[in-house]
Image (cartoon, helix red, strand yellow):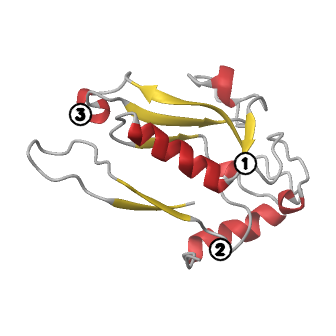
């Protein structure tokens, strides 16, 4: 088991009476209640794939691995992901399953991993981080330099 940093523990308290987004709906998502985001205690993943629509140093030849989460309720006027981020559609995933998705994207050649709209679905059970990886990715890595290993905790 991984020791969680103080900011992650604080988020664990904030999800009990959910205050993670400006809606501040106050439901107990740890108990599986559904918030204004239409998400309970488990993250809902809408899609995960390599993305090539950014600067070359961010996507490389294998793409940037993007994992999109459902349930963003901010309804930002200029959101370019609203068709997938503002619904509750997708598949519920455990932290371990999300880590496996990230590692699979790395295995497909993605040079980094992006969690898109993840704040309202961060791990909701205090002290139960899952150490996975390491991810062997580094954006804008100089040619000829060894890959940097990043431990990942979800």
Q: Is residue 59 above or below residue 102?
A: above
Which residue is nearer to you in this view: 10 or 84?
84
Quarter of the N terminus within the rendering: bottom right
Provide the residue designation for mark 2. 9
Of mark 1 and mark 3, the one earlier in the sequence is: 1
- In percent of width and height, residue 123 lies at 67, 59
Q: Is residue 132 left or right of residue 86?
A: left
Question: Is the Cβ of the residue at disc 2 closer than 8 Å to that at disc 3?
Answer: no
- In percent of width and height, residue 48 lies at 55, 32
Q: Residue at x 37, y 23 (%)?
A: 52
Quarter of the C terminus within the rendering: bottom right
Of mark 2 and mark 3, the one earlier in the sequence is: 2
Provide the residue designation for mark 1. 22
Q: Is residue 132 above or below residue 22?
A: below
Residue 57 numbered mark, or none: 3
As drawn, which residue projects farthest toward the left? Answer: 144
């Amino acid at each position: 088991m991984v020791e969680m940093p103080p900011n992650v523990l604080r988020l664990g308290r904030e999800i009990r009476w959910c205050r993670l987004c400006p809606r501040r709906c106050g439901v107990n998502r740890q108990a599986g209640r559904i918030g204004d985001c239409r998400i309970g205690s488990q993250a809902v993943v809408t899609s995960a794939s390599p993305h090539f629509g950014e600067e070359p140093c961010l996507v490389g030849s294998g793409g940037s691995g993007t994992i999109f989460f459902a349930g963003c309720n901010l309804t930002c006027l200029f959101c370019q992901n609203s068709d997938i981020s503002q619904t509750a559609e997708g598949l519920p995933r455990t932290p371990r399953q999300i880590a496996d998705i990230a590692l699979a994207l790395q295995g497909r050649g993605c040079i980094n991993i992006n969690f898109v709209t993840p704040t309202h679905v961060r791990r909701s059970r205090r002290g139960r981080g899952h150490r996975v990886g390491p991810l062997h990715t580094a954006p804008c890595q100089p040619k000829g330099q060894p890959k940097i290993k990043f431990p990942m905790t979800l």
